Image (cartoon, grey):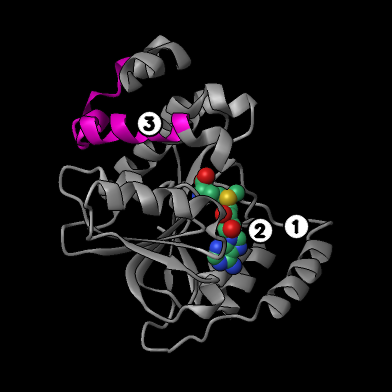
């Protein structure tokens, strides 16, 4: 079902090159999750009407490709603890759990609205090793080896919102982004540095897609969560100072 629908939703040449990506996953688990998303989409309000016809490509396959790249750049084993922030219906966190060698997955969202569906789903399946957390990330102080996020809030504020929650890497699944000196300095002020900014060519049929990997500049420094009020103010300030951008640079591996 998932593979058949995906084939209809993506150009043939993109599907053709996907074997090494599919091989990483338990496709039965993926298929089952796909059916769950389709069946509950309307009642759970997971995706827009237009996207309800593209769940296989725009949501599940997109996450699978991102995870493939994440694994290329970051050590992800059964021992790795990974938190998905703003997980909604479990995307992309639950798809990490569908890896044949799945890491320790936690899904966090401030709202019960969508996450409660995936909580029920994993209970039915007896997947008791997935942690479900109903909290704002600014109010959650547990740390994870890797923290991932997709469609939370715009970059670079999503990175700053996550700054206290990861030990090794924050991985941001992102659309088109513009990185300039202001943004690099803003991240630096928050003890963050972009390690890699990877353009995902396999997802070009969806538009521009990037995997942004960040780490701490000083790993010994203990970071407190940022207050939402402060972040909101900084968003406005940086937005205004960026309205006349200078020194733009967007390239792969910009610090390598
Ligand atoms: C647009 S949805 C994205 C859902 C999913 N990650 C996806 O890619 O489809 C954003 C989610 O982030 C959650 N969220 C927003 N701010 C948050 C915060 N500060 N802490 C935790 N979750 C947050 C919202 O409740 C919402 O479910």
For label 1, the SS is: loop
Is residue 89 depicted above or below 208 in this figure?
below
Q: Residue at x 71, y 80 (%)?
A: 230
Q: Nearer the viewer, residue 168 or 41?
A: 41
Q: Which residue is mark 2?
A: 180
Magenta region: which residues? 16-39
- For the C terminus, the quadrant is bottom left
- Mark number for residue 81? none
* Residue under label 3: 34
Secondary structure under the numbered disc 2 in the rendered image:
loop
Instruction: Please determine whether, in this image, residue 12 is positioned above or below residue 167.
Output: above
Measured as percent of width and height from the top left, residue 9 is found at 47, 16
Which mark's residue is nearer the viewer, 1 or 3? 3
Cα distance, mark 2 to mark 1? Answer: 7 Å
Q: Residue at x 63, y 57 (%)?
A: 153
Task: Give yes or no for residue 63 being in the magenta stretch.
Answer: no
The answer to whether any part of residue 70 appears in the image is: no
Q: Is there CB contact under 8 Å for labels 2 and 1?
A: yes
Q: Quadrant location of ligand 1?
A: bottom right
Q: Nearer the viewer, residue 200 or 250?
A: 200
Q: Is residue 17 magenta?
A: yes
| Residue ID for mark 1 | 246
Q: Residues within 10 Å of mark 1 (few under 14, many from 20)?
A: few
User: CB under 8 Å between callouts 1 and 3?
Assistant: no
Up/down of 103 relative to 219, above or below: above
- Left or right of 112: which side holds 145? left
**Horizontal and vertical percent for residue 89?**
47, 47
Residue 120 in picture, x, y percent from top left: 37, 51
Q: What is the crowding at mark 2: few (fewer than 14 residues within 10 Å), some, or many (at least 20)?
A: some
Tell me if residue 145 can be seen.
yes
The tally of labels here is 3
């Amino acid at each position: 079902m998932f593979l058949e629908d995906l084939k209809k939703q993506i150009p043939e040449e993109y599907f053709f090159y996907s074997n090494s990506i599919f091989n990483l996953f338990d496709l039965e688990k993926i298929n089952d999750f796909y059916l769950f998303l389709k069946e509950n989409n309307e009642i759970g309000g997971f995706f827009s009407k237009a996207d309800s016809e593209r769940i296989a490509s725009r949501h599940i396959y997109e996450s699978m490709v991102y995870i493939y790249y994440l694994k290329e750049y970051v050590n992800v084993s059964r021992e790795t603890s990974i938190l998905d922030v703003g997980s909604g219906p479990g995307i992309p966190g639950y798809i990490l759990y569908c890896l044949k060698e799945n890491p320790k997955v936690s899904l966090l969202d401030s709202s019960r609205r969508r996450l409660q569906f995936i909580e029920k789903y994993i209970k039915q399946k007896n997947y008791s090793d997935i942690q479900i957390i109903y909290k704002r990330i600014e109010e959650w102080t547990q740390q994870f080896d890797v923290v991932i996020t997709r469609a939370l809030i715009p970059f670079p504020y999503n990175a700053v919102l996550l700054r206290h929650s990861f030990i090794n890497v924050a991985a941001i699944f992102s659309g088109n982004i513009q990185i300039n000196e202001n943004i690099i300095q803003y991240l630096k002020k928050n003890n963050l540095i972009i390690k890699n900014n990877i353009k995902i060519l396999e997802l070009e049929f969806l538009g521009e897609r990037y995997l942004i990997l960040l780490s701490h500049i000083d790993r010994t420094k203990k970071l407190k969560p940022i207050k939402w009020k402060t972040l909101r103010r900084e968003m406005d300030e940086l937005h205004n100072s960026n309205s006349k951008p200078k020194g733009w640079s967007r390239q792969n591996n910009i610090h390598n």
